[in-house]
Amino acid sequence: MASEQKSYIIVGAGVFGVSTAYHIIRKYPNAAVAIVDRDAYDADNRVAASWDWNKVVRSDYDDIVYCQLGLEAQDIFETDPLWRPYFHKTGLLWMCRSQEYASDVLDSYKKLGRSDDVSIVPVSTARKMYGGLFEDADYTDVKEVLVNKNSGWGAAGDCLRAVTRRCLDLGVKYVTAEITALQLNARGRCRGVKTAAGETLAASQVVLCTGAYTSKLLEFCAASSGMADLRAEHRILAGGITTGMTKLDDESYERFANMPVGIQGYTPSTGPFVGSLPPTKDKELKWWGQTIFKNTQEVLPRRFISTPPPQRDYAQWRVSGKLKEDISFANHVFFGKNGAHWKMEKHRICWDAFTTSSDFIISPHPASEGLYVATCGSFHGWKFFPVLGKYVLQMLEGNLSPALSDKWAWDRDRPDPSLNADWPRFEMKDLIDPERASKL
């Protein structure tokens, strides 16, 4: 087939990049496919948002597109031998402060013809469920509670490594290098990428799955090529959030071992939803905080964008006192007195790329033929890992449905970010310890 003669460079080895490589090489076993990432796929320390202890796997979206994608991905997590070992169907309990959210989720399931075990219960019932684990949670302004017994969590880092290894077994090449520029011909067509070490890697199609690094990379590419239209501009914003874990003692683990994913849902005027994930086999229970922030920096003369800190590891383990308090807050609103004695440990800052609508961008880049963008997980992309590449490949081949092409377009009308509860609202410089300010 002609498509098998194409060559692909996928920049970024998170879920967008690895899933894309996986779907390409399965459809075209003889294609030349290379994943390029600054970190080795089996490194002990990586910057990808997908590299994490665990991530939520759910399909309970009020947006029917992501509900359908979530169901498609979850069916694979439950049935495919490659994915099944990493999915834990613990259920999910979502405390809804918006009157419409839970009913809109049920409406999405109904429209899709699914009869999954999803229900709405009053607060009085939620307090007693799962052995009363959330009896002392903060239910202030909670209208109702959504319970989805088919949701759960995935062992994120382990799954990412396993699927990457499968890609390599199938013939995908993995290159450990940092990309700093695009290789463009005289007409501006993308013919490959350039590494920080000066090496050029060539391919007929280049896909940027570069997450929080995307805006900065495109700024550098625009500057080096003189093609200003390469810039992301308002389309993409890099944002960070804090996660943290506690190691449960034996008594607490016995009680919380079978807990569901917990979510405290808030409204756009209040802020992002907060989550708690069940303990891992190592007895570690995880939260993510409510403070999502940007890090506006002058990356080139008079070019200010949000970008992760310049350290090679994004300074992800250097978490300020204020951000650690965010995790303590998350513990309190879920478990109250039941978690008051837990010691918060293993704090990490996770970075991702955002759009104002929290929609992905899966699109050709209009400024350069042969260049494509597949990113903007907005901290909700991991759960779609098994199917993301299917849709990226459809985009590459011009077969993505018109509805999805419009939703995930590079250029489209985007809503005011004030309507998005998860939009980065704070500046990192206002949240860090004083002695660190000059180093970011």
Image (spheres, grey):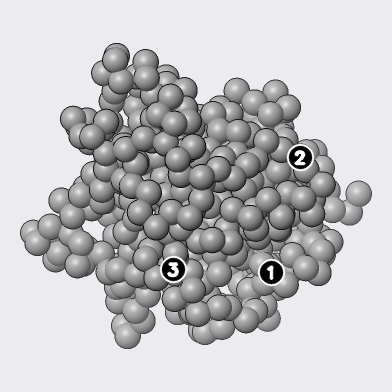
Q: Position of residue 420 (x, y in %)?
A: 48, 69
The secondary element bearing badge 2 is classed as: loop
Disc 1, SS: helix
Quadrant of residue 28 within the rendered picture = top right
Cβ atoms under marks 1 and 3 closer than 8 Å: no
Say whether disc 1 or disc 2 marks the residue closer to the N-terminus: 2
User: What x and y, as percent, mark residue 215?
Assistant: 46, 69
Mark number for residue 268? 3
For image coordinates 34% across by 70% down, the residue present is: 425
Q: Residue furthest front?
A: 124
Residue tagged by mark 2? 115
Say which residue appears at 72% left-offset and 72% top-offset.
Answer: 406
What crowding class fits label 2: few (fewer than 14 Cα within 10 Å), some (14-19), or many (20 or more)?
A: few
Name which residue type carries label 3: Pro
Which quadrant is the C terminus positioned in? bottom left
Q: Amino acid at mark 1?
A: Lys
Q: Is residue 389 visible?
A: no
Q: CA distance from mark 3 to mark 2?
A: 30 Å
| Residue depth check, mark 1 versus mark 2: number of the one nearer the observer | 2
- Which residue appears at 33% of the width and 50% of the height? 289
The residue under the point 34% across, 79% down is 304
User: Residue most toward the right?
Assistant: 1
Query: Mark 1 against mark 3, which lies toward the viewer?
Result: 3
Find the distance from the CA under tag 1 to the CA under tag 2: 27 Å
Picture quadrant where residue 189 is located: bottom right
Label 1 packing within 10 angstroms: few (<14), some (14-19), many (20+): many
Per the image, label 3 sits on a secondary structure element best described as loop
Q: Which mark is residue 297?
A: none
Amino acid residing under circle 2:
Ser
Q: Which residue is tagged 1?
A: 407
Give the mark, 1 or 3, whose residue is nearer the N terminus.
3
Up the image or down, 117 lies above or below 419; here it is above
